Image: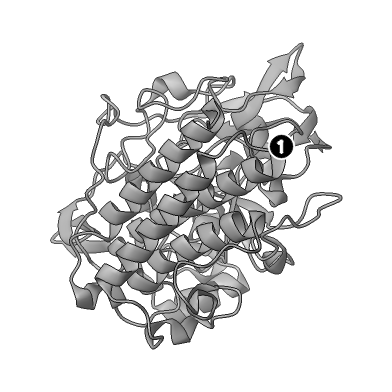
């Protein structure tokens, strides 16, 4: 008999599988392959890769004698060895074959879990592959946006105060010693969060909420994209090559603006956080506004820290609001809203310092390069973090509306190159 933890994991894996099917559902055979772009994968390849990852790292990782569900899967789906540009020309299973492969792997995972209690290695590997599927679920969502596909069928319970309006102003965060990263004993930790270590933080002031469309629109109207002095050398080179004049999905509508949301045009909501901006755009806005991006240590302190006697307390919170898990009153997560909500929404999710939406709604760019924490060692999925260190990627924090709630927490680190603006990313600012 499986223990309670194994039964729960089996249920979560089945739910993640159903979510993946919903995210690739409703697409034609042509759409499931899509155009060859650097920032997307073929949906059909990526769905098979998710199943392969479960099988390779969990089933085969625990039992080297496990027989793969399809022959030659490594040559098709191993992202570490299969070049990106070849993924459109591989002899992939068709739609039905891909779904059948996903289902066979899920059945094998659930059968393994039904055998008995989990040891530490099994516990880690099953959670790793679950979280991996969750991350690809978010990628499926922003790929649908990138390719002008219809919105996915993930709508559900959303924050009740989605039209709550703006939430301006700063909060003060005291300085002190802060433990950046995840502590041992956490249920599941990615390797780049290991381990919490002491850093010194000077007192700073940070915005209560992310920058809104209305606020960013003033930057656009003030010729922010054309003023060379606002941009770094790398940022200006990107802007020039991209011929960027405004956020990627905005379009002029007479004297106003509209925005593309999946395959439809919608009004630009002024109090929604600006989304689909890259690190260079965020940096230029900060220079224009006489502000700056927070470091990731500052961001985590503002999200997870608590004050005591005019300094940062020794401990910190898993979530900005405390220990309890996310719900729609606290955070806009899990893809249910099919987009961001106003920045004043979800007041129950405020941090101890009064920062709102540090989890959910949009990812938030930080000033920090993606680098290892002291003593870093790669986990079993060695290519998850280590290849991307070295200053090529910037850290994002907090999660977006399409991020799964079981994935997001104050210590979770995301990372992208500073040119990427297809992801659900915005930013909040700090006072100089």
Q: Measured along the vertical axis of the image, is residue 428 above or below residue 50?
A: above
Q: Does residue 326 appear in the picture of this structure? A: yes
The residue nearer to you, when weighing 284 against 150, is 150
Residue that label 1 marks: 182
Quadrant of residue 311 in the image?
top right
Residue 8 lies, in percent from the top left, at: 48, 32
Identify the residue at horizontal 78%, vertical 31% (top origin): 178
Residue 177 lies, in percent from the top left, at: 82, 29
- Decide: few, some or many residues near mark 1? Use Cα within 10 Å; few <14, some 14-19, many ≥20: many
Q: Does residue 295 appear in the picture of this structure? A: no
Residue 188 lies, in percent from the top left, at: 64, 39
Q: Farthest top residue?
A: 309
Quadrant of residue 386 in the image?
bottom right
The residue nearer to you, when weighing 42 against 147, is 42
Q: Is residue 251 left or right of residue 240?
A: left
Quadrant of residue 357 in the image?
top left
Residue 267 lies, in percent from the top left, at: 17, 50
Identify the residue at horizontal 60%, vertical 68% (top origin): 232
Figure quadrant of the C terminus:
top right
Q: Farthest left residue?
A: 254
Q: Identify the secondary structure beneath mark 1.
A: loop
Identify the residue at horizontal 55%, vertical 26% (top origin): 320
Q: Is residue 393 left or right of residue 9?
A: right
């Amino acid at each position: 008999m499986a223990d309670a933890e194994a039964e729960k994991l089996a249920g979560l894996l089945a739910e993640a599988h159903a979510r993946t099917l919903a995210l690739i559902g409703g697409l034609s055979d042509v759409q499931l392959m899509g155009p060859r772009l650097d920032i997307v994968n073929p949906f059909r390849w990526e769905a098979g890769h998710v199943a392969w990852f479960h099988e390779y790292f969990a089933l085969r990782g625990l039992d080297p004698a496990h027989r793969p569900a399809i022959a030659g899967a490594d040559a098709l789906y191993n992202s570490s060895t299969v070049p990106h540009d070849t993924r459109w020309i591989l002899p992939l299973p068709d739609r039905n074959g891909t779904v059948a492969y996903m289902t066979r792997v899920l059945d094998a995972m659930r059968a393994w879990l039904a055998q008995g209690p989990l040891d530490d290695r099994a516990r880690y590997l099953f959670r790793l592959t679950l979280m991996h599927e969750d991350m690809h679920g978010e990628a499926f969502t922003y790929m649908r946006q990138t390719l002008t596909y219809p919105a996915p069928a993930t709508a559900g319970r959303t924050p009740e105060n989605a039209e709550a309006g703006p939430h301006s102003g700063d909060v003060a965060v005291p300085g002190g010693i802060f433990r950046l990263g995840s502590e041992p004993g956490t249920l599941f930790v990615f390797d780049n969060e290991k381990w919490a270590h002491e850093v010194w933080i000077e007192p700073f002031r940070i915005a209560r909420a992310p920058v809104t469309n209305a606020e960013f629109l003033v930057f656009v109207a003030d010729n922010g994209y054309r003023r060379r002095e606002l941009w770094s050398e790398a940022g200006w080179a990107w802007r020039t090559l991209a011929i960027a004049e405004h956020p990627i999905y905005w379009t002029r509508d007479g004297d106003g603006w509209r925005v593309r949301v999946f395959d439809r045009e919608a009004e630009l909501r002024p109090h929604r956080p600006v989304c689909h901006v890259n690190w260079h755009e965020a940096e230029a806005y900060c220079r224009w506004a006489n502000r700056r991006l927070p470091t990731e240590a500052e961001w985590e302190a503002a999200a997870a820290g608590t004050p005591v006697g005019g300094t940062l307390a020794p401990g910190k919170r898993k979530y900005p609001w405390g220990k309890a898990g996310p719900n729609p009153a606290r955070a806009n997560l899990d893809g249910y809203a099919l987009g961001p909500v106003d920045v004043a929404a979800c007041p129950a999710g405020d941090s101890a310092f009064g920062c709102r939406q540090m989890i959910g709604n949009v990812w938030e760019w930080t000033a920090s390069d993606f680098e290892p924490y002291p003593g870093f060692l790669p986990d079993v999925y060695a290519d998850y973090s280590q290849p991307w260190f070295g200053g090529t990627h910037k850290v994002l924090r907090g999660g977006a509306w399409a991020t799964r709630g079981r994935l997001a927490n104050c210590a979770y680190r995301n990372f992208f190159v500073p040119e990427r603006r297809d992801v659900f990313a915005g930013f909040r600012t700090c006072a100089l």
